[in-house]
Image (cartoon, rainbow, N blue to C red):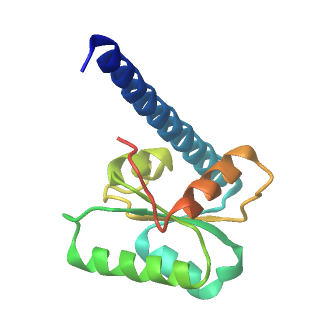
Amino acid sequence: MTQETIENETDEFCRENMGDMVHRLKIRWALQEVLNQAQINGHLVCGVHDAANELAVDLDTIGLCVLVENPRADAGIQVHCRLIEAYCWECAIPVIKVNNSCKLSEMTKHHMMLREPLHCVLVKNLSSDVESVSTLLQFARHSPAPLLKIT
């Protein structure tokens, strides 16, 4: 292997990582913007139990489900999250998983209301003509329940 080959491979690797990082930041920014708008408009449903109730009562208004992927969470919460995830898939509601319940709580301003971690957020009445919403929906459709690192 020549020095030129190594430099070319290194440059290609750096570009890929930078592209991935920019993509993740764009998705994270879009999630933050969508959550902020939904919070302002009163279109957030926070918490596993409230989300389950909302899905049972008003399914047609739910546009996005954000779940926390946390293997250390309480077993009961994990079961509820899996059931919500399966129900959302069944009803064609896009699901995005995040890796940090504390950060999700901060993003939704939920940490100011309760001290317990947040494991599920539903966003109601999404407007798909907004760029941040279309970015999130495209990310969610890319693969089933993609994981977004928000730490």
Viewer-side residue, 70 vs 2: 2
Q: Position of residue 133 (x, y in %)?
A: 68, 52
Please identify the quadrant where the C terminus is shown.
top left
Q: Position of residue 14 (x, y in %)?
A: 39, 25
View extreme (left): residue: 72
| Residue lying at 57% horizontally and 87% vertically, measured from the top left | 56
From the viewer's perspective, is residue 42 above or below residue 28? below
Please identify the quadrant where the N terminus is shown.
top left
How many marks the image carries: the answer is: 0
Q: In this image, 85 relative to 132: left or right? A: left
**Quarter-wise, where is residue 90 in the image?**
bottom right
| Residue lying at 63% horizontally and 56% vertically, measured from the top left | 138
Q: Position of residue 7 (x, y in %)?
A: 34, 16
View extreme (front): residue: 1
Res. 95 in view: yes
Res. 53 in view: no
View extreme (top): residue: 3
From the viewer's perspective, is residue 113 above or below residue 72? above
| Residue lying at 38% horizontally and 46% vertically, measured from the top left | 149
| Residue lying at 55% horizontally and 60% vertically, measured from the top left | 142
Q: In this image, 120 relative to 75: left or right? A: right
**Quarter-wise, where is residue 2 in the image?**
top left
